Amino acid sequence: MKTFKIGGVHPAENKLSASSPIREAALPKQAVFSMFQHIGAPAKPLVKKGDVVKVGTVIAEAGGFVSAPVHSSVSGTVSKVDVVIDASGTRRQAIFVDVDGDEWEPAIDRSPELVRLSDRPELDAATIINKVKEAGIVGLGGATFPCHVKLSPPPGSKAECVIINAVECEPYLTADHRLMLEHPEEILVGVSLIMKAVSVEKGYIGIENNKPDAIRLMTEKAQAYPNIEIVPLKVKYPQGGEKQLIDAVIGRQVPAPPAIPISVGAVVQNVGTAFAIYQAVMKNKPLVDRVITVTGKSVSSPSNLLARLGTPFQQLIDECGGLPEDTGKIIGGGPMMGKALLNLDVPMTKGSSGLLIMRQDEARRAEPDPCIRCAKCVSACPMGLEPYLLATLSDKQEWEMAEGNDVVSCIECGSCQFTCPSRRPLLDNIRVGKSTVMGIIRSRAAKK
Ligand code: SF4
Ligand code: SF4
């Protein structure tokens, strides 16, 4: 069975919510929309205190080409444009809407009827990309890169295939798995739309073989889509990394930055993004909600919630039985790549794929021992880096050497830290080194 070639680890899967069907979360009393829910320039507010909005109303415009608009996910009245502390602990400009009822923009088609590509023969690439752009779709796997940018390959590059990331290799997370079981046809139409947008004849959907029900169902439904192939993959973390997925599915290696997937002819999108693209193009529905996994070993009902963007995390946890008494840490995302949350007033954003509530015994970090030079971190690194060295260089603020040793290629997967017998905080140090070196590279480029 296919997988990527270099490194990788096998953390315990803990997919506690895999058999919980997606259920709709209750509306919040107040929804808060950060202007920074995507990579790139922040969105710019278009509304002010007192404005009345519906579900789907544009409340902020894109701040540039690499940016995305924001739509209200609720109906009600704008109470203020202020700042909010987001999941990264950073203060961000945000729009606050007091919720009143649940009135949707009339142009949004809320019927469950499937709309196939053959029902809309007039759709061309430019129309699809423009719809995706206007709907504020970003990569829902966690990267939050504005989708229309990826669908517009730079001059000189040519897309050859679309690869859909349905791997969901982060332990605990099950939102994508449930989406495939409950909306396979919409996903396949979404993939067809992506293929049409980038003018390719071949699409792949990579699914790890710990989801045999999803592989079976998607394979059955894909019979009607001869250009889309379901590719079962061996379970190995971090197979959801773009470069690892491309290697696993088509056996091509993306060179070091600045090379990107399109450099080897691949356009990669998450399976949740394909679903959102279906809704945007075929149902006129902007990105106002998404599926989020709320889970943990002491959570009474680990769940997959379809929740409106802007809903406070506290409310989502309450819907799953509340915060357990033995809570030690709450992570936004999965245990490998997620980040600890400072408070639960944080609103859900486009990139919120999971909330993991760790027990005190799981969250406690043991004191690190000295490096024993076992090289396990090197064997685990899927990018072929030397994590022990990068961590030391970052710790010593040797930025030039860190750059020379390719710290910017780190995908922050945490495989090195996971595998280290001395429990060294490798990823923590490397993250600091990577962001510092990227800042240095950016300011060097700006001076040129
Ligand atoms: S976090 Fe970075 S250095 Fe560590 S294994 Fe992943 S890619 Fe390699
Ligand atoms: S895995 Fe840990 S102990 Fe082994 S070489 Fe890497 S940093 Fe050192």
Image: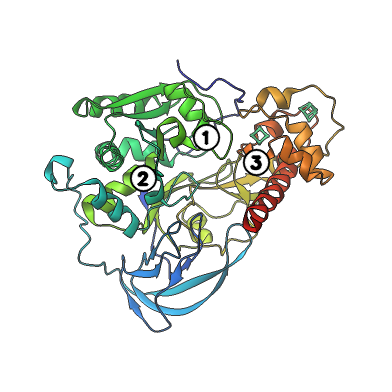
- In the rendered image, the quadrant that contains the N terminus is top left
Is disc 3 placed on a helix, strand or loop? helix
Pointer 3 residue: 408
Is disc 1 placed on a helix, strand or loop? loop
Q: Amino acid at mark 3?
A: Val
Residue at (71, 50) in percent of width and height: 436
On screen, 296 above or below 25?
Answer: above
Rounded to the nearest angstrom, the CA distance separating label 2 from label 3 is 24 Å
On screen, 387 above or below 327?
Answer: above
Q: Amino acid at mark 1?
A: Gly
**Left or right of 126 in this view: 23:** right
Render colour scheme: rainbow
- The disc placed on residue 241 is 1
Q: Amino acid at mark 2?
A: Leu
- The disc placed on residue 151 is 2
Rounded to the nearest angstrom, the CA distance separating label 2 from label 1 is 18 Å
Ranked by sequence position, the earlier of labels 2 and 1 is 2
Ranked by sequence position, the earlier of labels 2 and 3 is 2
Residue lying farthest to the top in this orientation? 1
To which quarter of the image does residue 135 belong?
bottom left
Residue 382 percent coordinates (x, y): 61, 28
Seen from the viewer's position, the closer of residues 94 and 249 is 249
Residue 159 percent coordinates (x, y): 36, 35
**Mark 3 close to ligand 1, CB under 8 Å:** no
